[in-house]
Amino acid sequence: MPGTEPDLPPEPRHALRGGGLPVAPSMSFTLAATHIPPPEPRFDWRTVYVAALAMLLAVAAALLAQALTALIALITNVCYFGRFSPIPVSPAGHTLGAWALLVPIMGAVAVGLMARYGSKAIRGHGIPEAMEQILTNESRIPPRMTFLKPISAAISIGTGGPFGAEGPIIASGGALGSWLGQRLTVSTEERKTLLAAGAAAGMAATFGSPLAAVLLSVELLLFEFHARSLIPVSLACVIAAGLRMHWEGVEPVFGMPALEGSGLAALCVYTGVGACAGLAAVAVTRAVYGLEDLFERLPLHWMWWPALGAVVVGSVGLLEPRTLGVGYDNISAILAMRFTLPALLTLCGLKFFSWLVSLSSGTSGGTLAPLFTVGGGLGASLGLVAAALWPGAGVDPRAAALVGMAALFAGASRAVLACIVFAFEITHEPHSLLPLLAGCTAAYLVSCMLMRHTIMTEKIARRGVPVPESYAADPLAKITVLDIASKSLETLNAEESLAAARKRLTDAHLTHQGFPVLNAKGALVGVLTRHEVLASEADPRTRLETLIRRPPVVVYHDCHVRQAVDQLLNHGVGRLPVVSRQNPARLLGIVTRSDVLAAYRHAGRSAQAPVSS
């Protein structure tokens, strides 16, 4: 058991075969001077402190989300209707005629100027940029992103850009959390938690989806599932969602008619819808980055690319005005099946084309709302076809639309759990959970099989940033150092002369390079390497204990191997004596870097080995 000294019999001083040595009353180094492993991080009051900061941050993120929504509405009203009002409105009802083509272009020029002279990081939908700062820059987002990202997104969306507000809100909330973490004395992990809390709170305040926001932060930002981060993020989402309900009520963002329970046949169809959405997600991701590559080849400064994309946005908007702006009303209409099949295919096809060109050009805006529109159209279309071809299956096109929405985003982002819960929270439809689980899992499977990176990670992967792909437990944290330690080893006597030690090391032809040094009572006093003994210019009569220059760096017998790795790295040594926790002078064995690598290799093979009957 951890903390219990192993019952091992003593052995001769120079051949420790599973045994230990007695305590010496006099040691060359006291215990206080010995480099013992630090205690493992544990749950403490720091988590309470960070949670309190996260809840305060949630209030600010909720206010920021409200401000961004109002700013988008204000810009839309001014540009398309000539009135000064923060009440949300769709640009589809404008009466500008052909002049409406100029509105997205003017907005895109403004965004391009902001990116050129403010921050290039405002380009895109924001989540990949937040991920990159977490992975490469200790979660340090420049403070100016707190206002540059929402303002640029508001201009882009308010002037007709076919984006959602969720990406910029998540990015802005994350920037706010990062700013707070940079202003206060917190660790890198705590700063990451504050960044994720701000981002998740922004999403929860926008859609009233606290659980989905927590899951999204785990799957895309935190890259861990740990109490020290989960608690602050969860509490931040609760506060943000509570504020939204206080301001806007408890009604779902996208209300839809009640669904009935699904039978096995219908679930099979919804699984197929999810698989088709997974294929579409792969195609969408490749199309986005393929078109970005084409923009990169243009003989024109990137500042003007959004204006080129806006020409397409405006032109498509003349053909189908409902493609302009966020289009949340389109999502509600799809879920209620208020479109005929031809109208549905036309709207979703044009929306996808407009969004694809605009996003690839480098303007500012989110991906969730456009992908929900496209995925909803795909799912509803497949549901209508399935209902016509197999009427006995009980397929509901509305449920198929919801599955298509969530599955397309799940396949594109691989935040599969967040997508399932998000679709449920924004509709409050309990009978959707099983179809969502089937469809999103199928999309996730197809995406993993056909695509290495996601729409969130492809951009930063191209920059050489490695992105975690799983949250498996560290195999080295499952093995104790005594399990891998060499217990049969050669030791040196502290009172032994340098000449005698050299002779022993030369005659024995030992393969290892480090040797624990014990005093007359058998207590550990340090470690000497072969090079230190053979290359020393000291008098050959010098006792070995005088060659020891620093206290021994040790590890307790019940520590796991991950702690041993930290000791090796922190102190720049190649081996660690293993000592008893109850008596650190008692040597039980030694762990080397080779032992650690062998343990990791063995753990990896064990994890991949098939189970035999």
Image (tube, rainbow, N blue to C red):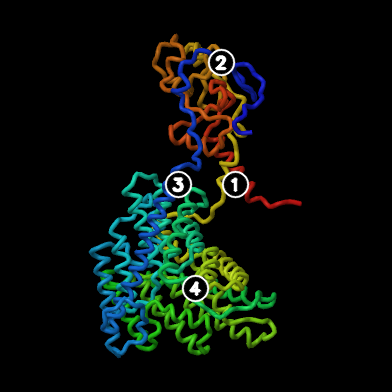
The quadrant of the rendering that contains the N terminus is top right
Place of residue 71 in the rendered image (x, y in percent of width and height, measured from the top left): 31, 72
Is 492 in front, or is 245?
Answer: 245
Q: Quadrant of residue 201?
A: bottom left
Mark 1 Cα shell of 10 Å, populated few (<14), some (14-19), many (≥20): few
Q: Please state the total of marks drawn on the protein image.
A: 4
Mark 3 or 4 closer to N-term?
A: 3
Residue at mark 3: 48
Dot 2 or dot 4: first in sequence order is 4
Q: Is residue 607 left or right of residue 166?
A: right
* Discs 3, 1 touching: Cβ within 8 Å: no
**Of the residues shown, which amino acid type is indicated by label 2?**
Gly
At label 1, which amino acid type do we have?
A: Gly
Q: Is residue 48 above or below residue 523?
A: below
Q: Position of residue 139 (x, y in %)?
A: 38, 52
198, above or below 164, in the image? above
Number of the front mark, 1 or 2: 2
Looking at the rendered structure, the secondary structure element under dot 4 is loop
The residue where tag 2 is placed is 522
The residue under label 1 is 604
Q: Nearer the viewer, residue 202 or 489?
A: 202
Q: Secondary structure at mark 1?
A: helix
Q: Residues within 10 Å of mark 4 (few under 14, many from 20)?
A: some
Callout 3: helix, strand or loop? helix
Between circles 3 and 1, the one closer to the viewer is 3
Instruction: Check disc 4 and report the residue beneath it.
Output: 252
Upstream in the sequence, badge 4 or badge 1?
Answer: 4
